[in-house]
Image (cartoon, helix red, strand yellow):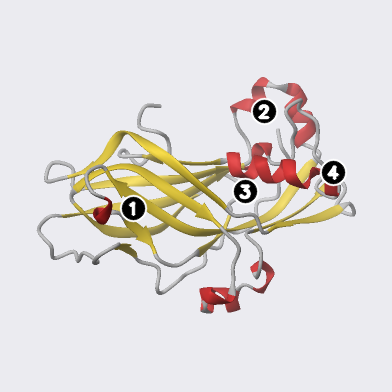
């Protein structure tokens, strides 16, 4: 099992964080509007560790004490017409929980319809991000900052940073549908940190070694998932 400290989770509050359409923003008074609750979950333990002793050994040598990531955009893509797409128009900062704690970002009004996929973009903060940029100096020009230590020794600490930009699409299967019969649902953004500092053979990727930087970035990109969770149990509806 990966060894982690579990600090208090802090989710940056952005007054301007709203889910809006490419053309107009719905209001809760609209007759044909449903609600989507967007939740972020992260994990530092998982089935892969229990099933793979070699992986457990490697991940146990990298202790993460904090991890912050910039989510630049989350967009829901309509199954019918691109003009009905909806997206967050400001970035938000996620302080990842080092356990399975769920954090609700926002419950938003979304027009009834069918949404085939979601698009997620991680990007660095730049001055155009306004107050969010000013409030987070450690993430200025960066998309992620991870702090921790290796070899179970707090004196062997590290700060891993990256300015990578990554846009990923995840299909909803079946499509996410909001209508009179199903006026609300939950969508989970899941980030699995268990494999960030591990190579394909289960060996530790020491974040202090510059040659490992690209491989760690690839692991982070691959750790992101989004799924619908109608029963609000934090898992895929088919699990």
**Number of residues whose C-alpha sits closer than 10 Å to that of mark 1, classed few (under 14), some (14–19) or many (20 or more):** some
Distance from label 2 to label 4 (Cα)? 17 Å
Which residue carries the number 3 mark? 98
Residue that numbered label 2 is attached to? 49
Residue bearing the label numbered 4 = 152
Residue at the (47%, 50%) spot, across then down: 120
Which of marks 4 and 2 precedes in the sequence? 2
Tell me if mark 4 has few (under 14), some (14-19) or many (20+) residues whose alpha carbon lies within 10 angstroms of its own: some
**111 displayed left or right of 40:** left
Q: CA distance from mark 3 to mark 4?
A: 17 Å
Q: How far apart in space, not on screen, are marks 4 and 1 (Cα)?
A: 38 Å
Task: Say above or below: 160 vs 198.
Answer: below
Residue that extends furthest to the front in the rendered view of this protein: 82
Disc 3, disc 4: CB below 8 Å? no
Q: Which circle, 3 or 1, is nearer the viewer?
A: 1
Residue 20 rendering spot, x and y as whole percentages: 31, 63
Mark 1 vs 2, N-terminal side: 1
Q: Position of residue 125 (x, y in %)?
A: 59, 67
Q: Which image quarter holds the N terminus?
A: top right
Residue contact between numbered discs 2 and 3, judged by CB atoms under 8 Å: no
Q: Residues within 10 Å of mark 3 (few under 14, many from 20)?
A: many
Kindly state the secondary structure of the residue where label 2 is placed.
Answer: helix
Q: Which residue is mark 1?
A: 37
Q: Nearer the viewer, mark 4 or mark 1?
A: 1
The quarter holding residue 26 reads: bottom left
Graded by Cα atoms within 10 Å as few (under 14), some (14 to 19) or many (20 or more), the crowding at tag 2 reads many
Coordinates of residue 134 in the picture (x, y in percent):
59, 79
The tag earlier along the polypeptide, 2 or 3, is 2
Identify which residue, 155 or 205, lies in the foreground: 205
Q: Secondary structure at mark 1?
A: strand
- Nearer-the-camera pick, 187 or 215: 215
């Amino acid at each position: 099992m990966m060894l982690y400290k579990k600090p208090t989770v802090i989710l940056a509050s952005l007054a301007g964080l709203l889910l809006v359409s490419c053309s107009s923003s719905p209001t809760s008074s609209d007759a044909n509007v449903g609600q989507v609750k967007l939740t972020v979950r992260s994990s530092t333990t998982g089935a892969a560790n229990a099933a793979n002793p070699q992986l457990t050994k490697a991940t146990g040598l990298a202790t993460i004490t904090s991890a912050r990531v910039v989510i630049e955009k989350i967009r829901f893509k309509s199954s019918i017409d691109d003009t009905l797409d909806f997206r967050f128009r400001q970035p938000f900062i996620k302080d990842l929980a080092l356990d399975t704690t769920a954090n609700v970002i926002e419950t938003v009004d979304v027009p009834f319809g069918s949404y085939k996929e979601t698009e997620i973009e991680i990007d660095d903060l730049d001055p155009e991000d306004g107050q969010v940029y000013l409030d987070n100096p450690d993430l200025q020009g960066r998309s992620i900052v991870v702090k921790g230590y290796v070899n179970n020794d707090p004196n062997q600490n590290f700060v891993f940073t990256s300015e990578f930009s990554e846009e990923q699409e995840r299909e909803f299967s079946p499509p996410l549908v909001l209508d009179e019969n199903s006026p609300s649902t939950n969508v989970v953004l899941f980030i699995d940190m268990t494999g960030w500092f591990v190579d394909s053979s289960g060996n530790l990727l020491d974040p202090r070694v510059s040659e490992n930087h690209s491989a760690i970035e690839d692991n982070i990109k691959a750790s992101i998932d989004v799924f619908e969770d109608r029963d609000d149990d934090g898992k895929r509806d088919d699990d």
